[in-house]
Image (cartoon, helix red, strand yellow):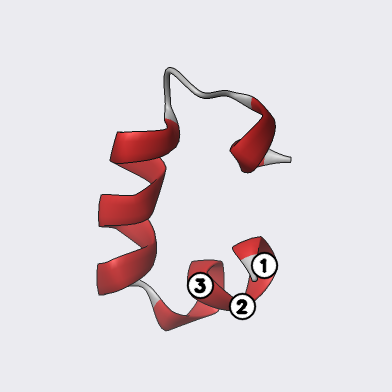
Amino acid sequence: LYLQNSSSAPAIEAATLSSPLKRKETD
């Protein structure tokens, strides 16, 4: 879902690095 937003990609990646749970969702 998040990966579709290229504009938010950098912010999402930063969030995933500090959030294991979100990391699983984006994986």
Q: Position of residue 4 (x, y in %)?
A: 68, 30
CB under 8 Å between discs 1 and 3: yes
Whether residue 21 sits left or right of residue 20 in the image: it is right
Residue of label 1: 25
Q: Residue at horizontal 52%, vertical 67%?
A: 22
The quadrant of the rendering that contains the C terminus is: bottom right
Query: Foreground: 16 or 3?
Result: 3
Q: Amino acid at mark 2?
A: Lys
Residue at x-position 39% and y-position 64% = 16
Q: How many marks?
A: 3
Residue drawn at x 25%, y 53% is 14
Q: Are marks 1 and 2 in contact (CB under 8 Å)?
A: yes
Element under disc 2: helix
Choose top left, top right, bottom left or bottom right for residue 26. Answer: bottom right
The alpha-carbon separation of the residues under discs 1 and 2 comes to 4 Å
Circles 3 and 2 in contact, beta carbons < 8 Å: yes
Q: Position of residue 12 (x, y in %)?
A: 40, 44
Q: Residues within 10 Å of mark 1 (few under 14, many from 20)?
A: few
Q: Is residue 7 above or below residue 26?
A: above
- Mark 3 belongs to which amino acid? Arg
Judged from the image, the secondary structure of the residue bearing numbered disc 1 is helix
Nearer-the-camera pick, 6 or 21: 6
Q: Give the numbered dot on residue 24.
A: 2
Q: What's the residue type where badge 1 is placed?
A: Glu
Q: Which residue is mark 3?
A: 23
